[in-house]
């Protein structure tokens, strides 16, 4: 075979949880109307974000949890876009056209009905900047702007496990547990200690009032 990715290898075995990234997934035979679900539990997931077990009607499913989601919360999933922006709470799923400008969002679709593909990592969130002619412009966590149809669904709030980027690895072996292979010595990056330094210019000397000799 051919080695396509050099940074992946080994790691502890992980159980995959079947996450439902499509929040507007209706039960069989149910009309496309708004429905509510109740959060049963919030649990750890080997991927970066925590997951929540929600139940509504005759089914249970796993979704990506938001920052302040707690067991017992009720979340709303609605496909409707009204004339006025809705007053959504964290964890609710609405089309972008129904949300007010400036809302923090996550789990964003690129095409209507395709399921969340963007802003799914732990602690990330995007911002709904503006709506233009049936489209919405969203600022991604990378500060890039993305334009999608206003019928694309997003979750209100920020993804859970906010302190994920503050964890201390501690040793090289833990990176191996996470499935990350070391680089070769040829590819060690050089930090600020290497190369030419760009220092600030010294203060200007004045020769206007020279002392008399």
Image (spheres, grey):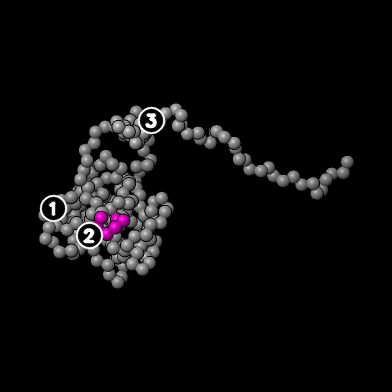
Q: Which mark is residue 59?
A: 1
Q: CA distance from mark 3 to mark 1?
A: 43 Å
Q: Position of residue 210 (x, y in %)?
A: 83, 45
Badge 1 marks a residue whose secondary structure is strand
- Report if the CB atoms under discs 3 and 1 are less than 8 Å apart: no
Q: Is residue 197 magenta?
A: no
Residue found farthest to the front = 1
Could you tell me if residue 71 is visible in this image?
no
| Residue 182 left/right relative to 72 | right
Q: Which mark is residue 77?
A: 2
Vertical order, 199 against 80 (above or below)? above
Q: Position of residue 167 (x, y in %)?
A: 36, 38
Name the residue carrying label 3.
182
Q: Earlier in the sequence, mark 2 or mark 3?
A: 2
What residue do we see at 25% from left, 55% from top?
114
What residue do we see at 82% from left, 48% from top?
209
Q: Position of residue 136 (x, y in %)?
A: 35, 62
Q: Earlier in the sequence, mark 3 or mark 1?
A: 1
Q: Which mark is residue 34?
A: none
Give the image quarter of residue 9. Answer: top left
- Identify the magenta region: 109-114
Give the image quarter of residue 12. Answer: top left
């Amino acid at each position: 075979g051919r080695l396509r990715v050099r940074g992946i290898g080994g790691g502890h075995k992980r159980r995959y949880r079947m996450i439902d990234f499509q929040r507007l997934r209706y039960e069989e035979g149910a009309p496309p109307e708004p429905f509510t679900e109740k959060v049963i539990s919030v649990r750890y997931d080997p991927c970066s974000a925590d997951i929540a077990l929600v139940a509504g009607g005759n089914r249970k499913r796993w979704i990506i949890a938001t920052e302040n989601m707690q067991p017992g919360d009720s979340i709303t999933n609605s496909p409707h876009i009204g004339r006025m922006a809705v007053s959504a709470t964290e964890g609710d799923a609405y089309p972008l056209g129904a949300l007010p400008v400036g809302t923090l969002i996550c789990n964003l679709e690129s095409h209507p009905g395709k399921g969340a593909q963007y802003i799914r990592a732990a602690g990330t969130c995007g911002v709904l900047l503006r709506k233009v002619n049936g489209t919405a412009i969203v600022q991604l966590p990378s500060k890039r702007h993305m334009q999608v149809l206003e019928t694309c669904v997003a979750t209100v709030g920020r993804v859970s496990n906010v302190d994920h980027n503050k964890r201390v690895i501690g040793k090289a072996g833990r990176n191996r547990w996470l499935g990350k292979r070391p680089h070769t010595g040829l590819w060690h990056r050089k930090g600020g200690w290497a190369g030419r330094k760009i220092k600030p210019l010294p203060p200007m000397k004045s020769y206007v009032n020279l002392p008399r000799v």
